[in-house]
Amino acid sequence: MAVHTGKVIKIGDKIDTDIIIPTQFMTIETIEEMKQYGFYPLRNDIPSIARPGDILVAGADFGCGSSREQAPEIIGALGFYCVIARSFARIFYRNAINNGLLVIENSEVYDRVQEGDTLGVDLGNNCLLLADQTEIPFGKIPDLLINMISCGGLVNYYKKLNTQAG
């Protein structure tokens, strides 16, 4: 697997799903239209500065709050390659994978990067690469989950399996 490299956008602890996509924007028809309001109450600049392949680095308890599937969809629509956080709310973690968003739990990287830094994600070796090539290990993500994420989420993964079986 190739190493993905992206620019860090960094946010803090306890970023709940109401921060990721506030309630007042939930009636917008599509995720593509909705994404311009991502992180609006916290940092309304994120939709304008995020570029495809960027990496969102967060503190503890990322995605807490309501079970809002639009939250990981917004992050993906903004172009983030993945979210790396000290910890995730369990329902957000699962919703992220189900929607094809890579999530990596790591307690060390938050204190070692700054906004704008370049960070590498090496899924083959289960490590993050700082700009100085220091490796920060993370727990292995099961191949099944990597395959789901690569397919764009749970539904697409099973569509692909069913097409191959048919």
Image: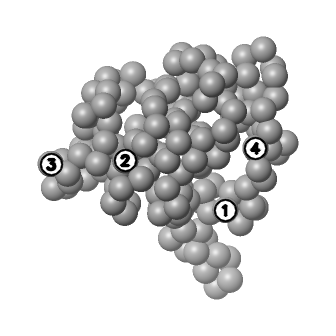
For the residue pair 150 and 7, the one nearer the viewer reads as: 7
The picture quadrant where one finds residue 107 is top right
User: Could you tell me which secondary element the residue under label 2 belongs to?
Assistant: loop
The residue at which mark 3 appears reads as 24
The residue at which mark 4 appears reads as 138
Q: Is residue 36 visible?
A: no
Measure the C-alpha gap from mark 4 to mark 2: 23 Å
Q: Which mark's residue is nearer the viewer, 2 or 3?
A: 2
- Label 4 with label 2: CB-CB less than 8 Å: no
User: Could you tell me which secondary element the residue under label 3 belongs to?
Assistant: helix
Image coordinates of residue 93 in percent, x first then y, are: 53, 57
Q: Report crowding for label 2: few under 14, some 14 to 19, many 20 or more residues within 10 A (C-alpha).
A: many
User: Could you tell me which secondary element the residue under label 1 belongs to?
Assistant: helix
Q: Report crowding for label 3: few under 14, some 14 to 19, many 20 or more residues within 10 A (C-alpha).
A: few
Q: Is residue 115 visible?
A: yes
- Label 1 with label 3: CB-CB less than 8 Å: no
For the residue pair 48 and 126, the one nearer the viewer reads as: 126
Q: Quadrant of the N terminus?
A: top right
The residue at which mark 2 appears reads as 16
The residue at which mark 1 appears reads as 145
Q: How many marks?
A: 4
- Classify 133 as above or below 163: above
Q: Quadrant of the C terminus?
A: bottom right
Q: Which mark's residue is nearer the viewer, 1 or 3?
A: 3
- Give amino acid for label 3: Gln
Q: Earlier in the sequence, mark 2 or mark 3?
A: 2
Q: Looking at the image, which residue is at 78% across and 32% down?
A: 136
Q: Looking at the image, which residue is at 67% across and 30% down?
A: 109
Q: Looking at the image, which residue is at 78% across and 53% down?
A: 140
Measure the C-alpha gap from mark 1 to mark 3: 32 Å
